Image (cartoon, rainbow, N blue to C red):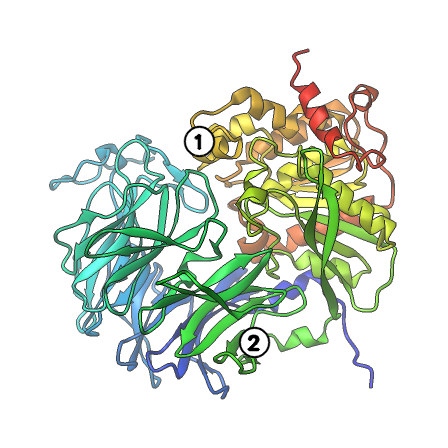
C-alpha cells in the first residue's frame, strides 16, 4: 500500500515541537524534558515540562504554563521537581511534586533567574540571578546608594563588552549566585562584584561551589574558573590561562572539576579539561582535535573514572566516554546525524536527535549491545510529510595551497527524485562551526526539497569538527580558500547530473559573508540570500558585540587588528560588481552582525547597478531571527527565501563587469583553478 504524503510547507514550523533539555532522576527511571512549541494565536513560544519513563511507557505532561517552563531539576530524593517559569512575568524558581499536583513559586528573587541546582541535602538550591545595578557606579559597590532616576536612562559603557546579542546593553545588571531555601523561599546572595557568573556546579558534599565568571576591569569577555564555600565565603580563582571557561561539573568523589575551555580569544573550538581540586593541577583530556559539541553535555560516570559527553566529529555528533586515567575514547552513540539535549540515566544514554529527515524526539540507547529506541512521539504530523533522502557526499576540491583535498557535505533531496534538480548551496555560519541540521533554523530546506530541489550543506575548509588544521587554515584567508571549494562542489554535482545551472546560494552570519562575497566574484549563482552577514570586517570590529576580539583571531592576527587585510577580505570590496539578484535579511536589533553590515552592502549594490536587490529588516529581532525569532518572523523569512530563489534561479546572472573579469576573479568556468580566488584577492589589495 502506497503511503500518501503532503509536501512540507513553511507553516509546518508552527507544528514542530522541539526537545530542548533533558534531566534524569537519580534512580534513572524517569526523564524530565523541556518541550518548546508555538502559540500561533499569540505569536510566541511556549515551553512545558514533560515526564518520560525510561521503560518507554506513556509520556506525561507536568506543566502547562502559561509562559515558558524550563530547566527541570529533580531533587536528590526524586520527590520534587524544581524548574524555572516565566508565568509570573519574570523567570523565577518553582517547585512541583514529582507525583503530580500544582506548581508553586519558590520565593521572589531580585531579578530573572537563569539557572538553578539542588544542594545535595535537598533543603536548598543555588540559583543565578540577574541583579539590577547602576552603570554609573562603574563597577564600584553601591554602599547603600540608590540608582539615579532618569526619564530616559543613559547607557554608560566603561568596559568591554558593554552589549550582547539578544540582551542589548549589559552594564545595568550583574549575574550573581544566591542560596534559595526550598522550604520557605528565603534567599541570600553568595557572590558580589562587577562581574557575571556564567555557570556553576555544586560539590557532592555541598561544601563548595565551582563557578565560571567574567573578569573585572576594561576587558570582561574572558572568563575563569572560581570556587567558593557553600555559604559564599572564601572565593578564590582557580584558573588564569584560558580565554573562556564553561560549565564546571564536579566528579562524584569530589576530587575533580571538569569544564570546557578555549585558550585563545575568539576561538570557538572547545576542549575538555579537568582540574584536581586539592592540587589545582589542570589537564586536558584528549588532543586538541577532540572537540566538545556542547559543554553542558559533560557528565561524570558514577565511579569518577571517566566522563560522558557529546563530541563534534566530522559534522556529526557522537556520545563518547573518555577515561580519566589514559584518555582512551569509546564511542557509545554515533550515526550520520547530530544530537540535541543529552543526559545519562544509569547505564542508558538519553538524547534528542537533530536530522533533516526526522523530527525532534527523545531516544534512549542502553549499554553497548542494546538496541536504540525512541521514547517520545511529540511530532506525529511529520510522518505525513514528503520523505527526504539525506546523504553525506564527498567532494574533491582545491585546498587553497596549490593542492587538493576531500571534503564532506550533506545532500538533501526528496526520496525518489531524479536530477538534474535546482540546487540551493547553503553556507553555514561560524566560520568555525559546521552545517547544523536542526529543523527550526532550516525549515526552507524541507520546503524546497518537497518542491523538487536539492540542498547542499557543505563543510568547507574552516569548518570545525574536522581537526584543528582544517579549521584554523582559513584564518586570514576568508573567501580565498573556501569559496573555490563551494564552486568546485557545485560543479561536481552538476557533472554528476544531480543539479543543473539553476543554482542559488544562501547563508547567515559567516554564511552571509561568503554569500555576499560570492556574488561579487562569481556568476555561478543565479540567486542569493544574504542574512545577517559580516559585510565590512573593518566596521564589524567596532560594532559587533564580540568583533573586537573575534575578528583579529579570524584574520590570523590575534595580537592586533589588521585593517588593510580586513578591508581586502570584505564583501564590500567587490559587491558593486555583483549581477546576481540578492535578498538581504537582517534582525534590526542584531548586535552580533549589526544591521549596518547588511545596509552597507544593499545600498552599495543598489547604487552601483540595476541588479535586483531587496533589504528586509525585522524590528525587535536579533542575530537569531531565522531559527529563534518571533514565530511570524521565522515564517516570513523562510517564505521569502523560498520565493526569492524560486523566482530568480530561472534566469542566468549577467556577466561580471569587464574590469573584474580581466583580474581573474573566479566564475563558473574557471572554478576548477583553486588559486584564482586567492589571486583575485591579492590583486584587489593593490592600491588603485
Residue 548 location (% of width, % of height): 44, 31
Q: Is residue 151 above or below residue 250?
A: above
> Which residue carries the number 1 mark?
548
Question: On the picture, is 650 further left or further right than 188?
Answer: right
- At numbered mark 2, what does the secondary structure look like: helix, strand or loop? loop
107 and 335: which one is in front? 335
Question: On the picture, is 346 further left or further right than 448?
Answer: left
- At numbered mark 1, what does the secondary structure look like: helix, strand or loop? helix
- Quick one: which residue is furthest to the front in this view? 326
Q: Is residue 148 above or below residue 196?
A: above
Question: On the picture, is 580 further left or further right than 226?
Answer: right
> Which residue carries the number 2 mark?
378
Residue 413 location (% of width, % of height): 77, 62
Residue 282 location (% of width, % of height): 30, 51
Residue 554 location (% of width, % of height): 52, 35
620 and 419: which one is in front? 419
Amino acid at each position: 500500500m502506497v503511503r500518501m504524503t503532503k509536501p512540507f510547507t513553511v507553516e509546518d514550523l508552527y507544528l514542530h515541537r522541539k526537545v530542548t533539555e533533558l534531566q534524569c532522576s537519580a534512580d534513572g527511571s524517569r526523564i524530565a524534558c523541556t518541550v518548546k512549541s508555538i502559540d500561533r494565536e499569540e505569536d510566541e513560544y511556549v515551553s512545558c515540562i514533560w515526564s518520560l519513563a525510561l521503560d518507554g511507557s506513556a509520556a506525561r505532561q507536568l506543566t502547562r504554563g502559561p509562559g515558558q517552563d524550563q530547566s527541570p531539576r529533580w531533587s536528590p530524593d526524586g520527590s520534587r521537581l524544581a524548574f524555572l517559569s516565566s508565568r509570573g512575568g519574570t523567570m523565577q524558581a518553582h517547585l512541583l511534586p514529582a507525583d503530580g499536583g500544582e506548581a508553586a513559586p519558590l520565593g521572589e528573587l531580585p531579578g530573572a533567574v537563569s539557572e538553578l541546582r539542588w544542594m545535595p541535602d535537598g533543603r536548598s538550591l543555588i540559583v543565578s540571578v540577574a541583579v539590577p545595578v547602576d552603570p554609573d557606579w562603574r563597577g564600584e559597590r553601591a554602599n547603600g546608594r540608590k540608582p539615579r532616576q532618569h526619564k530616559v536612562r543613559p547607557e554608560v559603557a566603561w568596559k568591554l563588552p558593554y552589549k550582547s546579542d539578544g540582551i542589548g546593553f549589559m552594564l545595568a545588571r550583574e549575574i550573581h549566585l544566591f542560596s534559595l531555601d526550598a522550604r520557605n523561599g528565603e534567599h541570600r546572595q553568595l557572590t558580589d562584584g562587577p562581574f557575571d557568573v556564567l555557570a556553576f556546579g555544586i560539590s557532592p558534599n555541598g561544601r563548595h561551589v565551582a563557578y565560571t565568571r567574567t573578569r573585572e576591569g576594561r576587558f570582561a569577555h574572558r572568563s575563569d574558573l572560581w570556587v567558593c564555600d557553600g555559604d559564599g565565603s572564601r572565593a578564590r580563582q582557580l584558573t588564569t590561562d584560558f580565554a573562556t571557561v564553561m560549565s564546571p561539573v564536579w566528579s562524584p568523589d569530589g576530587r575533580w572539576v571538569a569544564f570546557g575551555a578555549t585558550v585563545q580569544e575568539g576561538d570557538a573550538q572547545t576542549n575538555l579539561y579537568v582540574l584536581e581540586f586539592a592540587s589545582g593541577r589542570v589537564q586536558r583530556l584528549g588532543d586538541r582535535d577532540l572537540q566538545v559539541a556542547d559543554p553542558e553535555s559533560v557528565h561524570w560516570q558514577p565511579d569518577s573514572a571517566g566522563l560522558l559527553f557529546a563530541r563534534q566529529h566530522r559534522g556529526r555528533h557522537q556520545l563518547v566516554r573518555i577515561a580519566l586515567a589514559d584518555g582512551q575514547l569509546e564511542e557509545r552513540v554515533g550515526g550520520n546525524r547530530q544530537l540535541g539535549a543529552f543526559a545519562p540515566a544509569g547505564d542508558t544514554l538519553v538524547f534528542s536527535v537533530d536530522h533533516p529527515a526526522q523530527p525532534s524526539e527523545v531516544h534512549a540507547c542502553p549499554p553497548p549491545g542494546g538496541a536504540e529506541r525512541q521514547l517520545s512521539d511529540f511530532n506525529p504530523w511529520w510522518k505525513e510529510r514528503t520523505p527526504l533522502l539525506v546523504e553525506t557526499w564527498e567532494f574533491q576540491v582545491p585546498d587553497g595551497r596549490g593542492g587538493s583535498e576531500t571534503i564532506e557535505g550533506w545532500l538533501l533531496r526528496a526520496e525518489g527524485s531524479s536530477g538534474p534538480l535546482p540546487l540551493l548551496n547553503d553556507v553555514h555560519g561560524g566560520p568555525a562551526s559546521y552545517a547544523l541540521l536542526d529543523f527550526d533554523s532550516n525549515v526552507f530546506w524541507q520546503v524546497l526539497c518537497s518542491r523538487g530541489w536539492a540542498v547542499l550543506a557543505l563543510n568547507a575548509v574552516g569548518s570545525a569538527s574536522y581537526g584543528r588544521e582544517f579549521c584554523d587554515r582559513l584564518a586570514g584567508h576568508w573567501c580565498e580558500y573556501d569559496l573555490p571549494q563551494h564552486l568546485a562542489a557545485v560543479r561536481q554535482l552538476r557533472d554528476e547530473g544531480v543539479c543543473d545551472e539553476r543554482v542559488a546560494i544562501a547563508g547567515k552570519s559567516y554564511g552571509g559573508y561568503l554569500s555576499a562575497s560570492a556574488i561579487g566574484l562569481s556568476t555561478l549563482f543565479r540567486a542569493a540570500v544574504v542574512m545577517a552577514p559580516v559585510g565590512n570586517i573593518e566596521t564589524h570590529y567596532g560594532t559587533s558585540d564580540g568583533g573586537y576580539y573575534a575578528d583579529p583571531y579570524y584574520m590570523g592576527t590575534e595580537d592586533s587588528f589588521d585593517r588593510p587585510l580586513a578591508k581586502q577580505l570584505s564583501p564590500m570590496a567587490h559587491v558593486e560588481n555583483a549581477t546576481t539578484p540578492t535578498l538581504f535579511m537582517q534582525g534590526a536589533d542584531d548586535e552580533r552582525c549589526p544591521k549596518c553590515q547588511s545596509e552597507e552592502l544593499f545600498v552599495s549594490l543598489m547604487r552601483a547597478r540595476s541588479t535586483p536587490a531587496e533589504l528586509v529588516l525585522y524590528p525587535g529581532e536579533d542575530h537569531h531571527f531565522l531559527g529563534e525569532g518571533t514565530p511570524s518572523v521565522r515564517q516570513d523569512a523562510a517564505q521569502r527565501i523560498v520565493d526569492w530563489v524560486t523566482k530568480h534561479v530561472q534566469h542566468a546572472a549577467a556577466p561580471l563587469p569587464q574590469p573584474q573579469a580581466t583580474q581573474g576573479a573566479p566564475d563558473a568556468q574557471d572554478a576548477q583553478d583553486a588559486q584564482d580566488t586567492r589571486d583575485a584577492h591579492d590583486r584587489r589589495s593593490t592600491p588603485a
